[in-house]
Image (cartoon, rainbow, N blue to C red):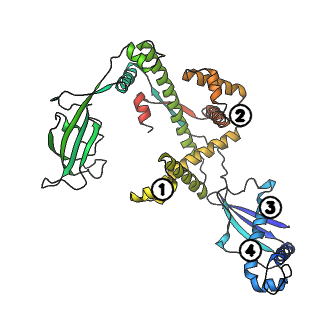
Amino acid sequence: MNVTKEIKKIENSSVKLTATISKDDVAAEYKKSIEKYAKNIQIPGFRKGHVPVSVLEQKYGEALKSEIIGDLIDKTLNDILQGDDAKDFRPLPYAQPRLEGDKMPEFDTSKDFTFTVTYDVFPDVKVTNFSGITVKEPVVEIGDKEIQDELKAIQERNASVIDKKDGDPVAKDNIVTIDYSELDDAGKVIDGSKREGFVFTVGSGENIYKIDDEIIGMKKDETKQITKTYDKKDPDADLAGKTKKISVTVKAIKERNLPALDDDLAQDVSEKYKTLDDLKKDIASKMELAKTRKIKEIKTQSLLSQLVEKNPFDLPKSMIAAENEARWNMLAQQFKTSPEQLEKMILSSGQSKEAMLEQWVGNTEKMLKSRIIVDALMRDKNISVTPEEVDAEYAKIAEENGITLDEVKEHYKDLKAKEYLVDEVKESKLFEELYKEVKVAKGDKTTFADLFKEEK
């Protein structure tokens, strides 16, 4: 067919495509389609395949015309968008072209046929502005205190839990079982507030009324009425600025019996440790590795955030919607349910899927723009990975995880796993180059623990 096209970029990474088909081709396509229908349609009074075109047009004219127009538009779009020159303006897979005005254009076999569609395309991104970017690298030292904190955590994980002696009071870090209920001004239990057999660790704050300090000193089977006034700035809106009366009965008190910090504990943790010093050295090594990875992550996020800000571009709405829908489906998988059932669960809690997706938009946009910028820079800088670089990464993984090179290679025999690894190596090479184009400076001093808290 003789088709002319005009393509115009519009806002939000969309395009407007106007196509015009010559009147001769319009007439020929119409004739071919109507004759096909005439051969296959069955109308009373006519043998199949012998229905006159004039009768067919008189009886089904508008319906047939609409269907033929639809087929003509689809055929024309397919020819245009599958062409070799169409790679820069093909629609996103989840963004179907929409007729302008959402209605069929005028169709006359004696005239050229023109239609216009709009659709979303992949953003055209040029990352050129690196000016004024400073990436700060947190300064973190790992000393004896950090290693002792980790040893304490290992002690707690390997502790045995035993009942306290009768008559011994509740103390910080004890594990208690309590019954509780909220009381009204007359001292009566408020409906729905009663709870039995609630277990928590004293000092963790992991109880609804935050009564850790108030139950310290209580004994098993003791009941106590607690009156507590909460700060107006309490993050729990149900508590902020209010005074609550709570009845609490301690049903059980347990304490952790921590093992000694010695060679036996090290051997209990893993057979690869012979002494406590072996365990300490491994802790230090793993903490250094975790620190390096976290600082790398922080630097990457900082750089990408600044690149997104300095190199603005629009995202198509369909891309944001598709990403949010994918996140919704992943959330359903995490809850081990279907997307439809998840929506019912959300509705029952007083929220809606639409409201949640709307809340996600900001983070989704930031994540998508970061990903697109990385892909654009990969292409611009022609980043690639050699087999030798992949082998070097295998060796690094083996060393960091204390496993053999053969074990690493066996894991990455899976094609998808290897592709993921190659992408990681490519990204690392990209950021090594990018850090040469921006300023990298020392950031604030922080502790190992706070390094991870800040990024939660």
The image shows residue 334 at horizontal and vertical percentages of 49, 46
> Which amino acid is tagged 3?
Asp
The Cα–Cα distance between marks 2 and 4, rounded to whole angstroms, is 49 Å
The image shows residue 367 at horizontal and vertical percentages of 55, 46
Residue receiving disc 1: 341
Residue receiving disc 2: 384
Lower position in the chain sequence, tag 1 or tag 3: 3
Mark 4 touches mark 3? (CB < 8 Å): no
Question: What quarter of the picture does the N terminus occupy?
Answer: bottom right
Nearer to us in this view, 36 or 432:
36
Q: Secondary structure at mark 2?
A: loop
Instruction: Give the label, 1 or 4, closer to the camera.
Output: 1
Q: Secondary structure at mark 4?
A: helix
Question: What quarter of the picture does the C terminus occupy?
Answer: top left
Residue 393 seen in this snapshot: no
Lower position in the chain sequence, tag 2 or tag 4: 4
